[in-house]
């Protein structure tokens, strides 16, 4: 199966995303066809550069972005089913007249450079899900440039972005976070405040090729889910084992502090109290999303046991 990579370019307006895409399309990446999808060329001028807001987005802007998303999906479908490949450019251009030419033949592998700001993680996640749906690979390339550099470059543009839009986007942008979001684990950062040198470009090309070879597969997801479940069970048993040791020590201390008659009479109740306490802790661990420390669970177990022991003492005193 051919390798397909969706790459979201992330960065402020005038941060150098398009220049980087142009350079990548001019380079020859062996066995890869690079499709540069420049959102600014596809979305009508009147719908471009809305003010970034935390709670809403202009419906016209969202509609055009969805059209682009649908066209990218058509291209991926054509890659997976080459019999439809010859008509995909015509189909996409009926919706987006400036959509880039997609090859009529069947290139071995394809890299889609999605050239937009992608300042919210939700915007990028939509393309991750698209890659996931077709067992393609996904990556992000971050174009990192100082706000002042972006403002200066923007002033020389033929169609400049309103400066207040850039400033607002700078405040709200959600940079890829591979540690917090596992789906963003393939992220490459380029310092675009200066010209991209050949060494950086070589590293970026290697990154793209490497990322394309790590597509999402449902078999991988099932395997990861099984591994997480095994790890969870192993961790649960480990914690419960340590809590059980603490409770056994507590029972031993209690038994040593009482007479033989008391021990023979209440040893079964103590054993049941220990088991009940352990079951309470087990249920708490299973339902607790806060992932408390082992020491916390041990302290809680001893507290519960002491409470039950106190109740047992009151019963024996009154009997």
Image (cartoon, rainbow, N blue to C red):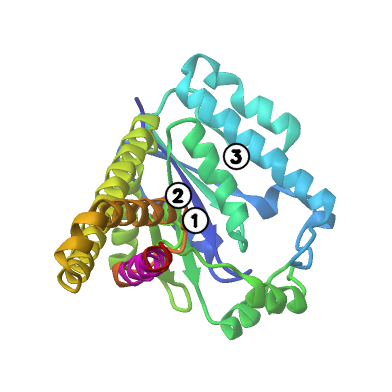
Seen from the viewer's position, the closer of residues 32 and 240 is 240
Picture layout, residue 317 above or below residue 115: below
- Lower position in the chain sequence, tag 2 or tag 3: 2
Residue behind mark 3: 100
Dominant secondary structure of the residues highlighted in magenta in the image: helix
In this view of the protein, can residue 188 be seen by the observer? Answer: yes
Evaluate if marks 2 and 1 touch, with contact meaning CB atoms under 8 Å apart.
yes
Picture layout, residue 185 above or below residue 135: below
Q: Quadrant of residue 127?
A: top right
| Left or right: 251, with 49 as reference point | left
The location of residue 176, given as percent across then percent down, is: 49, 63
| Residue at x 52%, y 53% (from the top left corner) | 8
Q: Assess whether residue 310 is covered by the magenta stretch.
A: yes
Dot 1 surroundings within 10 Å: few (below 14), some, or many (20 or more)? many
**SS at circle 2:** helix
- Quote the CA–CA distance across marks 2 and 1: 6 Å
Residue behind mark 1: 21
**SS at circle 3:** loop
The location of residue 222, given as percent across then percent down, is: 36, 33
The range drawn in magenta is 296-313
The quadrant the C terminus occupies is bottom left
| Residue at x 33%, y 45% (from the top left corner) | 228
Residue behind mark 2: 25
| Numbered-mark total | 3
| Residue at x 74%, y 73% (from the top left corner) | 165
| Residue at x 36%, y 28% (from the top left corner) | 2
- Lower position in the chain sequence, tag 1 or tag 3: 1
């Amino acid at each position: 199966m051919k390798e397909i990579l969706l790459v979201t370019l992330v960065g402020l307006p005038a941060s150098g995303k398009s220049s980087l895409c142009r350079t990548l399309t001019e380079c020859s990446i062996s066995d890869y066809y690079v499709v540069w999808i420049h959102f600014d060329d596809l979305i009508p001028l009147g719908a471009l550069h809305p003010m970034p807001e935390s709670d809403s987005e202009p419906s016209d802007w969202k509609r055009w972005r969805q059209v682009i998303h649908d066209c990218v999906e058509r291209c991926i479908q054509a890659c997976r089913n080459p019999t439809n490949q010859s008509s995909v450019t015509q189909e996409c251009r009926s919706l987006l007249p400036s959509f880039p030419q997609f090859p009529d033949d069947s290139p071995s592998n394809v890299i889609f450079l999605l050239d937009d700001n992608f300042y919210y993680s939700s915007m990028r996640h939509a393309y991750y899900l698209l890659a996931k749906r077709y067992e393609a690979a996904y990556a992000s390339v971050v174009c990192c440039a100082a706000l002042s550099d972006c403002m200066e470059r923007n002033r020389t543009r033929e169609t400049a972005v309103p400066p207040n839009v850039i400033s607002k986007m700078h405040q709200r942008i959600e940079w890829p976070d591979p540690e917090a979001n596992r789906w963003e684990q393939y992220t490459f950062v380029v310092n675009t405040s200066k010209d991209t040198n050949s060494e950086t470009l070589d590293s970026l090309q290697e990154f793209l090729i490497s990322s394309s070879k790590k597509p999402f597969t449902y078999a991988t997801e099932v395997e990861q889910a099984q591994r997480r479940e095994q790890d969870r069970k192993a961790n649960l048993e480990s914690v419960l084992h340590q809590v059980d040791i603490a409770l056994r020590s507590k029972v031993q201390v209690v038994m040593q502090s009482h007479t033989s008659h008391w021990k023979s009479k209440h040893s079964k109740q103590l054993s049941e109290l220990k088991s009940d306490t352990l079951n309470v802790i087990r249920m708490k661990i299973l339902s607790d999303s806060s992932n408390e420390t082992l020491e916390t669970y041990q302290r809680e177990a001893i507290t519960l046991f002491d409470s039950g022991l106190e109740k047992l003492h009151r019963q024996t005193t009154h009997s």
